[in-house]
């Protein structure tokens, strides 16, 4: 991805989130949603012209300090903040860097093999790099003999995913928002960019939600599946990133117990 594309994405992201922030000002009804540009500039302590240039994708060289103030002014979540810094080509001191190694870490492959509940590993492109028998049984049409091992492609383009996920559209939107947090950390990865472009062509929902600029951290919680043999199944999903390889994920679906939070 070129620096021009990154700046344009940054501008689109800032504007999209500016329009979501409540102005918190009494008075007459406003014609435009969210904050006005001058209100965001005042909150972030930057000039209105500077704010406009950022949204227009101009080459203004935004500093980490300015990005931090923008993140606070826009009330960004940690995942959204990380994405903002990556779009600007700046490093947030709180965000860890990942190494670029092709093989899945032993921490994931060994853990997946040891777990009796459904568990699988994802690489940086969200391809399944390993899984156990319980996961193969649960994820009909994705793991096992299925040719499509990419979780995004499976969720957005394989018909059996809609049958397996009773809340398919909401789950697909959430998955994409979680993936976007990773995408922001690897903007210069051509394979990742190609995956996004392919999915935008293959799925109308993916294309629509991609332009919505939603970003979420991958969080745990209840996940319900409608299995063709076992019927309705609910698990508590938890995702782990190895400290030495944060670009990989271990996803485990533990037996659901009452009292856990539903997300």
Image (spheres, rainbow, N blue to C red):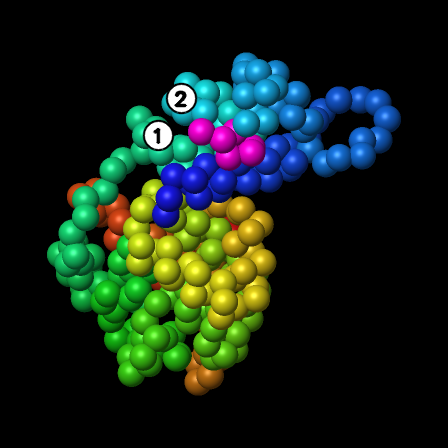
Q: Is residue 112 above or below residue 47?
A: below
Side (left or right) of 106 relative to 69: left
In front of the other: 114 or 7: 7
Q: CA distance from mark 1 to mark 2?
A: 8 Å
Magenta: main secondary structure equals loop
Residue 227: x and y, percent? 46, 78
Residue at mark 2 = 63
Task: Say whether marks 1 and 2 touch (CB < 8 Å).
Answer: yes
- Residue 11 lies, in percent from the top left, at 53, 36
Across and down, in percent, residue 118 comes to 32, 68
Quadrant housing residue 43:
top right
Instruction: Return the disc, 1 or 2, that comes first in the chain's sequence.
Output: 2
Q: Residues within 10 Å of mark 2 (few under 14, many from 20)?
A: few
- At horizontal 15% and vertical 58% (from top left) the residue drawn is 103
Residue 86 drawn above or below residue 106: above
Question: According to the image, label 1 marks what residue?
Answer: 90
Kindly tell me whether residue 188 is visible in this rendering.
yes
Q: Residues within 10 Å of mark 1 (few under 14, many from 20)?
A: some
| Total tally of numbered discs in the picture | 2
Q: Which residues are magenta?
A: 54-59
Most foreground residue, 161 or 15: 15
Against 67, is 211 above or below?
A: below
């Amino acid at each position: 991805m070129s620096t021009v594309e990154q700046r344009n994405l940054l501008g689109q992201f800032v504007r999209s989130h500016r329009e979501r922030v409540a102005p918190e000002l009494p008075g007459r009804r406003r014609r435009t949603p969210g904050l006005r540009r001058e209100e965001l500039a005042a909150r972030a302590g930057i000039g209105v012209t500077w704010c406009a240039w950022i949204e227009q994708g101009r080459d203004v060289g935004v500093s980490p300090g300015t990005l931090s103030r923008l993140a606070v002014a826009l009330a960004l979540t940690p995942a959204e903040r990380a994405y903002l810094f990556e779009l600007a080509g700046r490093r947030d001191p709180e965000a860890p860097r990942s190494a670029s190694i092709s093989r899945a870490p032993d921490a994931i492959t060994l853990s997946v093999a040891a777990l009796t509940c459904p568990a699988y590993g994802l690489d940086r492109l969200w391809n399944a790099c390993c899984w156990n028998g319980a996961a193969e049984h649960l994820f009909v049409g994705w793991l096992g003999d299925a040719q499509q091992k990419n979780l995004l492609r499976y969720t957005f383009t394989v018909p059996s995913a809609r049958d397996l996920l009773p809340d398919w559209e909401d789950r697909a939107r959430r998955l994409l928002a979680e993936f976007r947090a990773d995408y922001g950390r690897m903007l210069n990865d051509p394979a990742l960019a190609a995956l996004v472009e392919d999915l935008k062509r293959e799925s109308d929902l993916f294309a629509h939600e991609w332009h919505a600029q939603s970003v979420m951290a991958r969080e745990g919680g209840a996940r319900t599946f409608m299995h063709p043999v076992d019927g309705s199944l609910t698990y508590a999903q938890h995702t782990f990133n190895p400290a030495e390889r944060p670009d990989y994920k271990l996803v485990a679906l533990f037996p659901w117990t009452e009292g856990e939070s539903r997300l």
